[in-house]
Amino acid sequence: MELLKEKIKQEGKVLSDTVLKVDSFLNHQIDPELMLEIGKEFAARFKEEGVTKILTLESSGIAPAVMTGLYLNVPVVFARKRKSLTLVNDLLTAEVYSFTKQETNEISVSQKFISENDRLLIIDDFLANGQAALGLADIVDQAKASIAGMGIVIEKGFQDGGKQLREKGYKVESLAIVQSLANSKVTFTQVEEM
Ligand code: 5GP
């Protein structure tokens, strides 16, 4: 998605050879117009997949997920990373090792929001080693629901997650695939645009 790649080139900060910071439009401040375009693009890529609900992870997945939900006309559920006092019963949980925080979090979703008949589109902001996406997929499996695919805003193609998820047979659509962050420079893998 050219608009997204331009934004990454202009505003992304390369923190190391493996970490990209995009806090001016996705991870802290949010660019609503760009999120709307991202939602439109995910909706186009998954419109034939029978999506009934979107599942994401707080907090940075929420903005792109909500915009996608708007276009696909389906609800959006986000997994929580911290235990909430009001979220105690009937939880579906999974362990997720965080690449950026280097710690394991338990993520949870109330089981009342995912039913066996649901077909979920998993959305996240970044794909690195695939831990977040696999944790969300685990929650969908526990609910005996099905997975329509995974929509990733920024995939880091030099890390293993994308390969792992595609090998498992998931339809993974990434709007920008970063090939390298070496020498403080962002280069992208050319992928076919729809
Ligand atoms: P994974 O679970 O695929 O290893 O990592 C994906 C998760 O880690 C995303 O939910 C995202 O929050 C975070 N993440 C991974 N790599 C980056 C990165 O380069 N930049 C930022 N901002 N977040 C990242």
Image (tube, rainbow, N blue to C red):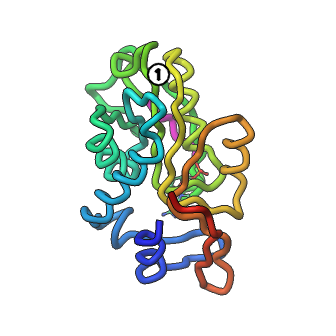
In the displayed structure, 191 sits above or below 95; it is below
Above/below status of 149 relative to 159: above
Quadrant of the rendered image containing residue 115: top left
Residue in the image at 74% along x and 40% along y: 167
Task: Give the image location of residue 3, x and y in percent.
Answer: 40, 71
Q: Is residue 44 left or right of residue 87?
A: right
Report the amino acid beneath label 1.
Answer: Leu
Which structural element holds mark 1?
Answer: strand
- In the figure, residue 174 lies in which quadrant? bottom right
**Viewer-proximal residue, 56 or 75?**
75
At horizontal 53% and vertical 62% (from top left) the residue drawn is 193
State whether residue 60 is above or below residue 84.
Answer: below
Rendered location of residue 7, percent (x, y): 41, 76
The residue drawn where x is 67% and y is 70% is 179
Above/below status of 91 relative to 32: above
Q: Position of 165 compared to 53: left or right?
A: right
Specify the principal SS of the magenta part.
strand
Asked whether residue 188 is drawn in magenta, I would say: no
Residue range (magenta): 104-108
Crowding around mark 1 (Cα neighbors within 10 Å: few <14, some 14 to 19, many 20+) is: many
Q: Nearer the viewer, residue 126 or 149?
A: 149
Coordinates of residue 164 in the picture (x, y in percent): 72, 44
Question: Where's residue 143, x and y in %?
Answer: 49, 17
Q: Quadrant of ligand 1?
A: bottom right
- Residue drawn at x 42%, y 20% as measured from the top left: 118
Read off the residue under disc 1: 92
Q: How many marks?
A: 1
Q: Between residues 183 and 192, which one lies in front from this camera angle?
A: 192
Mark 1 close to ligand 1, CB under 8 Å? no
